[in-house]
Image (tube, rainbow, N blue to C red):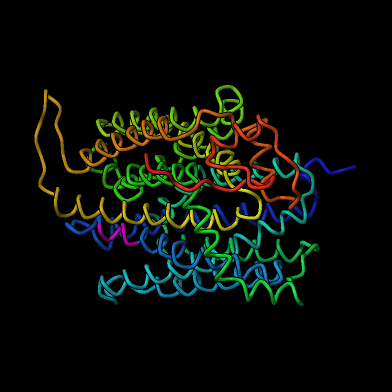
């Protein structure tokens, strides 16, 4: 009989436990660094928003420059060994930063501390780009069957959101009561827990070898280029990317400026900043739980554009808040539709990308989206610290300052992305014939003739029948 505390199977449960602890450690680490930079290193400085945006910029840079190529190398390596090495390396990096943080702040110039923080964050996230695909491949070996893999995906999403409930409220007390080094040590120990949990997982998947590996090495550039060409010719993929990029420019300001919004606009102590992160974590869990039913009810397309409209409107209302209670409530309300639309975009991506192109489609989609997030963080920090620093006024009795103005404009941008999604996304369902047609593209390599209904539905996703196989239509001038 399977033990009550086992999730799917024992091997997966061990892997999940290690990652759950490590994810909590990561949320404590990231929240602590944002608070420390904002309230200690850059306290009272006009360039504080730019300093905080540097932390987010370092994270984005790793995803942008390392992410597209890391998966290729992970495919050639032993997956379990890759996870062990990356966890050991990340734990060592955080441990080194912990040792240095024991020095008084005056021991190094502020610029030196910032460089050290940015470099550590960059290296941690660069290494993480190798860990993530290795973990996904391992889960694919440990968990078989469509239903169990769906459960594994749901567990991963709920775990990540739960970590944001636990981590931020834990980070602020650790930083302000016992010091930075203890918060960093917590993260280093979480990597150790993950390392031993991975070691206890017995199953592993050997790396490709022989002629297959040789062909992969020889065709890397050609296949990567083919993936870019496929993406550019698919109207729905380009539309989804446009929606994600516009949305990132709207939402990215929250990541950079929310800590300053908490103290200046919500008139709350920095100690309470973690509860805003907790509200977003709870909203994420609620959104994840409800997303499947909502998508089944109104479809992935409607869930995407309605979610953007609602979340953008809520962000505008959030920008007008002056108290912590209202801020927490509206951030919760903001995160629920955001999580739903993120969930809804997944079947749209899968439906538009044949199996043989999915890895390369994601290698384009996520780095470009991260680039947009990175630019949004830089833009928000620059606007708050320079261009709009002295903005103050009132309209119809409503007072406006630099940060709430940026948040309000960001909300309008998210609403505009919802309007674009309503126009650009096809009105076909993401399941049934459409899903089957897109799923069929390139998965088997056979030449079965597609039905007229499949061709019609697939056409709405920018695909056309080429000898029984679906390929993206080229752009046509209107």
**How many circles with numbers are drawn on the protein?**
0
User: Taking 216 as reference, is 151 above or below it?
Assistant: above
Image-based side of 65 in relation to 461, left or right: left
Quarter of the image for the N terminus: give it.
top right
- Tell me what residue is drawn at x 42 percent, y 51 percent: 173
- Tell me what residue is drawn at x 79 percent, y 44 percent: 145
Q: Position of residue 305 (x, y in %)?
A: 44, 31
- Chain part drawn in magenta: 50-54
Q: Is residue 373 magenta?
A: no
Q: Position of residue 92 (x, y in %)?
A: 54, 73
Image-based side of 389 in relation to 209, left or right: left
Which sits in the foreground, 78 or 215?
A: 215
Which sits in the foreground, 29 or 410?
A: 410
Q: Taking the image as drawn, is residue 271 in sight?
A: no
- Tell me what residue is drawn at x 66 percent, y 56 percent: 136
- Tell me what residue is drawn at x 41 percent, y 75 percent: 100
Q: Position of residue 22 (x, y in %)?
A: 58, 57
Q: Residue furthest right?
A: 1
Q: Taking the image as drawn, is residue 64 in sight?
A: yes
Image-based side of 245 in relation to 285, left or right: left
Rendering quarter of residue 130 = bottom right
Q: Residue furthest front?
A: 467
Quarter of the image for the C terminus: give it.
top left
Which sits in the foreground, 319 or 43?
A: 319
User: Taking 150 as reference, is 49 above or below it?
Assistant: below
Q: Position of residue 304 (x, y in %)?
A: 47, 33
Image-based side of 160 in relation to 34, left or right: right
How would you classify the magenta stretch by its main secondary structure? helix
């Amino acid at each position: 009989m399977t033990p009550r505390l086992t999730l799917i199977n024992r091997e997966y449960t061990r892997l999940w436990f290690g990652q759950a602890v490590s994810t909590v450690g990561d949320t404590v680490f990231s929240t602590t660094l944002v608070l420390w930079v904002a309230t200690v290193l850059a306290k009272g400085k006009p360039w504080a928003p730019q300093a905080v945006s540097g932390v987010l910029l370092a994270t984005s840079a790793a995803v942008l420059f390392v992410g597209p190529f890391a998966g290729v190398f992970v495919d050639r390596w032993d997956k379990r060994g890759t996870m062990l090495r990356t966890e050991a390396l990340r734990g060592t990096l955080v441990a080194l930063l912990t040792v240095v943080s024991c020095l008084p702040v005056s021991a190094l110039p502020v610029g030196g501390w910032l460089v050290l923080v940015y470099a550590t964050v960059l290296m941690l996230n660069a290494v993480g780009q190798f860990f993530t695909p290795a973990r996904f491949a391992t889960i694919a070996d440990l968990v078989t069957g469509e239903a169990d893999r769906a459960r594994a995906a749901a567990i991963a999403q709920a775990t990540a959101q739960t970590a944001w409930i636990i981590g931020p409220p834990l980070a602020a007390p650790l930083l302000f009561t016992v010091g930075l080094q203890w918060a960093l040590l917590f993260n280093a120990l979480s990597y150790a827990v993950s390392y031993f949990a991975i070691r206890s997982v017995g199953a592993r998947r050997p790396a490709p070898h022989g002629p297959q590996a040789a062909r992969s090495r020889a065709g890397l550039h050609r296949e990567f280029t083919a993936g870019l060409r496929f993406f550019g010719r698919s109207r729905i993929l380009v539309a989804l990317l446009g929606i994600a990029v516009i949305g990132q420019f709207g939402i990215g300001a929250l990541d950079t400026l929310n800590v300053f919004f908490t103290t200046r606009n919500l008139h709350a102590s920095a100690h309470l900043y973690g509860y805003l992160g907790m509200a977003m974590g709870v909203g994420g869990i609620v959104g994840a739980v409800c997303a499947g039913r909502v998508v089944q009810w109104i479809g992935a397309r409607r869930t995407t554009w309605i979610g953007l409209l609602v979340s953008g409107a809520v962000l505008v209302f959030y920008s007008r808040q002056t108290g912590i209670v209202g801020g927490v409530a509206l951030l919760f309300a903001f995160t629920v539709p955001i999580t739903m639309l993120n969930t809804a975009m997944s079947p749209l991506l899968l439906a538009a990308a044949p199996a043989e192109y999915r890895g390369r489609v994601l290698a384009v989609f996520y780095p470009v989206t991260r680039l947009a997030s990175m630019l949004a963080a830089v833009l928000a920090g620059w606007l708050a610290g320079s261009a709009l620093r002295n903005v103050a006024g009132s309209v119809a009795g409503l007072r406006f300052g630099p940060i709430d103005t940026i948040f309000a404009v960001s909300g309008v941008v998210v609403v505009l992305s919802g309007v674009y999604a309503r126009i650009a996304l096809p009105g076909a369902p993401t399941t049934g014939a459409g899903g089957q047609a897109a799923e069929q593209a390139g998965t088997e390599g056979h030449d079965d003739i597609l039905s007229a209904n499949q061709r019609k539905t697939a056409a709405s996703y920018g695909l056309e029948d080429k000898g029984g196989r679906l390929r993206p239509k080229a752009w046509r001038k209107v």
